[in-house]
């Protein structure tokens, strides 16, 4: 049985007209008619959508030799229909979550700053070395603990939108147009934030390079490292807070990394990221805390980012 016959059979089995199926897949009735007459076939994204709507596997739809329906365990009835009110609430909550997560990440990035500053002051004899080290570590741990608390709290507030992350939803009639309008209005501020963040990351090393080239005292070098972290934290906040809003639009419209095909490709790299970054953080702290060489150990982060990008690309290719 060819693809066209299977679509006709499944549509009639569900009691849908061509217009009703077209609305569910967000295409025209003419497109459905062409699929059913074998005049054309849908792209891979629409095939994935059809498989979810009918509750069958993509193998059943695409392999002519498969005559018996192979069910995936999902059906259109299992998918939530997102109204405009729900979509607006999600975008608003996602924006708040982005800002809260950004603050948490900033706290993590800035956590060594107090320790570095106190170490610089102790070198000048303004504070005892033991007191500087102890107080610095205490403040560092408090900041990290606060960040973890923010991450947990903000994530719990987003639990009711878990179905969005899985893609188990469809937009009510007219919602996609409104979301696309929001996304269009957000393009400029997102681009400005992205460019600003990149520039800040590039310029963050300038104070440290100047200090190193001028052969200044060690405490000045330590303070420039602290300044580097402050500049980077601003860039990271822009990336996280604005990126969350951008991802909300992509999630609702199922674009970019939330496209059904991309979602499948990203599954393995997402699992890897969940293990990789906590391990990198642990290694960073385990090396930095005993050695107090914060002016050197920060290099772990850009190196880790390059390794992550390479491994993620390899995992995607294996799919």
Image: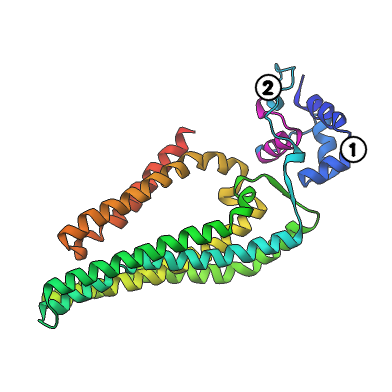
User: From the viewer's perspective, is 215 left or right of 187?
Assistant: left
Q: In which quarter of the image is the N terminus?
A: top right
In what element is the residue under mark 2? loop
**Alpha-carbon neighbours of circle 1 within 10 Å: few (<14), some, or many (≥20)?**
some
Along the line of sight, which residue is nearer the eye, 63 or 147? 147
Q: Is residue 67 above or below residue 165?
A: above
Tag 1–tag 2 contact (CB < 8 Å) = no
Residue 191, position in %: x, y?
52, 68
Query: On the image, numbered disc 1 is attached to which residue?
Result: 17
* Quadrant of the rendered image containing residue 49: top right
* Quadrant of the rendered image containing residue 19: top right
State the predominant SS element of the stretch in magenta: helix
Q: Residue at x 61, y 45 (%)?
A: 166
Along the line of sight, which residue is nearer the eye, 269 or 99? 99
Q: Residue at x 23, y 54 (%)?
A: 286
Q: Residue at x 79, y 25 (%)?
A: 6
User: From the viewer's perspective, is 57 left or right of 31?
Assistant: left
Q: Which of marks 1 and 2 is in front?
A: 1
Query: On the image, numbered disc 2 is attached to which residue?
Result: 63
**Alpha-carbon neighbours of circle 2 within 10 Å: few (<14), some, or many (≥20)?**
few
Residue 115, position in %: x, y?
23, 71
Q: How is the image coloured?
A: rainbow
Q: Does the magenta stretch include residue 130?
A: no
Tell me which segment is drawn in magenta. 45-59
In what element is the residue under mark 1? loop
Residue 156, position in %: x, y?
55, 57
| Residues at marks 1 and 2, CA–CA distance in whole angstroms | 24 Å
Q: Can residue 215 be seen in this view?
A: no
Tell how many labels: 2
Nearer-N-terminus badge (1/2): 1
Residue 270, position in %: x, y?
47, 44
């Amino acid at each position: 049985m060819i693809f066209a016959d299977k679509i006709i059979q499944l549509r009639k089995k569900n009691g849908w007209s061509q217009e009703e199926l077209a609305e569910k897949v967000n295409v025209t009735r003419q497109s459905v008619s062409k699929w059913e007459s074998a005049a054309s076939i849908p792209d891979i994204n629409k095939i994935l959508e059809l498989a979810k709507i009918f509750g069958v596997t993509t193998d059943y739809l695409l392999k002519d030799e498969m005559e018996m329906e192979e069910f995936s365990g999902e059906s259109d009835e299992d998918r939530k229909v997102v109204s405009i009110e729900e979509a607006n609430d999600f975008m608003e909550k996602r924006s708040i979550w982005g800002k809260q997560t950004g603050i948490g990440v900033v706290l993590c990035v800035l956590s060594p700053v107090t320790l570095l500053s106190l170490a610089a002051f102790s070198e000048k004899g303004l504070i005892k070395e033991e007191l500087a080290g102890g107080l610095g570590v205490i403040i560092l741990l408090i900041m990290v603990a606060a960040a973890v608390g923010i991450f947990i709290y903000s994530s719990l507030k987003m639990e009711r939108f878990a179905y969005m992350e899985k893609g188990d939803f469809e937009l009510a009639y007219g919602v996609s147009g409104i979301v696309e309008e929001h996304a269009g209005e957000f393009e400029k501020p997102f681009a400005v934030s992205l460019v600003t963040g990149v520039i800040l990351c590039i310029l963050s090393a300038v104070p440290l390079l100047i200090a190193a080239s001028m052969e200044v005292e060690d405490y000045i070098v330590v303070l420039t490292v602290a300044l580097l972290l402050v500049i980077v934290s601003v860039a990271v906040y822009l990336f996280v807070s604005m990126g969350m809003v951008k991802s909300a639009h992509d999630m609702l419209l199922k674009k970019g990394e939330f496209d059904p095909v991309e979602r499948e490709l990203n599954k393995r790299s997402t699992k890897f990221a969940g293990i990789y970054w906590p391990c990198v953080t642990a290694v960073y702290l385990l090396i930095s805390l005993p050695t107090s060489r914060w002016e050197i150990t920060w290099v772990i982060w850009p190196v880790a980012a390059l390794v992550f990008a390479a491994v993620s690309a390899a995992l995607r290719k294996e799919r």
